[in-house]
Image (cartoon, helix red, strand yellow):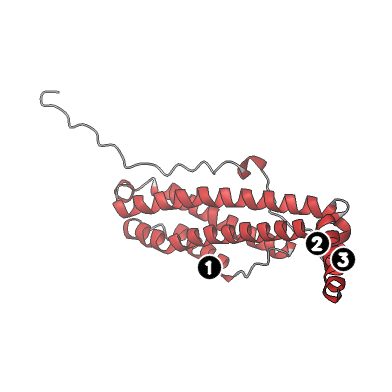
């Protein structure tokens, strides 16, 4: 009997919390955290490609020092940020730094168009393919994170979950700002190019 009197209040409390959305808040919060981890993982994957890419380009186009330096500096700034995804200012700083690195990489790839030997180098082509795949995964991971945060924020703002959220200190989360909403579902259109096609040798007498 004593055991029953102890367990009953706990069962009632669990039922009330579940009915007020407590369990769902936990699940959605964990989903946001998991999505954020994937975003960080993909951005790190991109940053890890930069040193090899810079060194490879430098071997064929060392005179492009300004562009190479921009990429290296942008990667360095990304590495210096200790982002807190729950802080709007920190997330904005992180997003800006990642955007600067993406822009620097795009400028670097434009420059490589002027170096046919570089474009035909197998190591460079492999790095291009890895970078292209990583950019696609970054876009997908960001899109999932944006959706998870939107779902979480909408849920804890709704009744009666809003009461539960306030009681337990759950607040809305900042999100990535998207200037072009199509970027959520579409990877950036980056032309990584192919090796230059060899022109056929002229035939004798022509």
Q: Work out whether residue 62 can be spotted.
A: no
| Label 2 residue SS | loop
Tell me which residue sits at (57%, 61%) in the image.
40
* Residue 55 coordinates in the image, percent (x, y): 37, 62
Q: Give the Cα separation between the discs numbered 2 and 1.
A: 32 Å
Tell me which residue sits at (57%, 58%) in the image.
38
| Label 1 residue SS | helix
Q: Give the Cα separation between the discs numbered 3 and 2.
A: 10 Å
Q: Is residue 187 above or below residue 42?
A: above
Classify 10 Å Cα crowding around label 1: few (below 14), some (14-19), many (20 and above): some
Farthest residue toward the front? Answer: 1
Q: Nearer the viewer, residue 58 or 139?
A: 139
Q: Which residue is mark 3?
A: 167
Classify 10 Å Cα crowding around label 3: few (below 14), some (14-19), many (20 and above): few
Classify 10 Å Cα crowding around label 2: few (below 14), some (14-19), many (20 and above): some
Q: Which residue is mark 1?
A: 76
* Residue 24 coordinates in the image, percent (x, y): 75, 56
Q: Which residue is mark 2?
A: 171
201 vs 183, left or right, is left
100 vs 113, left or right, is right
């Amino acid at each position: 009997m004593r055991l029953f009197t102890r367990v009953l209040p706990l069962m009632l409390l669990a039922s009330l919390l579940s009915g007020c959305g407590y369990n769902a808040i936990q699940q959605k919060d964990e989903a946001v955290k998991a999505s954020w981890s994937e975003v960080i993982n993909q951005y790190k994957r991109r940053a890890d490609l930069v040193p090899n890419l810079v060194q490879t380009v430098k071997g064929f186009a060392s005179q492009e020092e300004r562009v190479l330096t921009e990429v290296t500096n942008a990667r360095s700034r990304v590495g210096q940020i200790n982002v807190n995804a729950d802080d709007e200012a920190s997330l904005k700083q992180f997003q800006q730094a990642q955007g600067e690195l993406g822009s620097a990489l795009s400028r670097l790839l434009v420059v490589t168009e002027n170096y046919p030997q570089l474009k035909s180098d197998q190591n460079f082509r492999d790095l291009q393919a890895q970078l292209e795949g990583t950019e696609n995964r970054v876009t997908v991971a960001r899109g999932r994170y944006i959706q998870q945060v939107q779902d979480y924020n909408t849920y804890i703002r709704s009744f009666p979950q809003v009461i539960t959220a306030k009681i337990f200190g759950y607040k809305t989360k900042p999100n990535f700002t998207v200037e072009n909403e199509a970027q959520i579902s579409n990877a950036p259109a980056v032309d990584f190019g192919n090796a230059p096609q060899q022109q056929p040798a002229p035939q004798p007498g022509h």
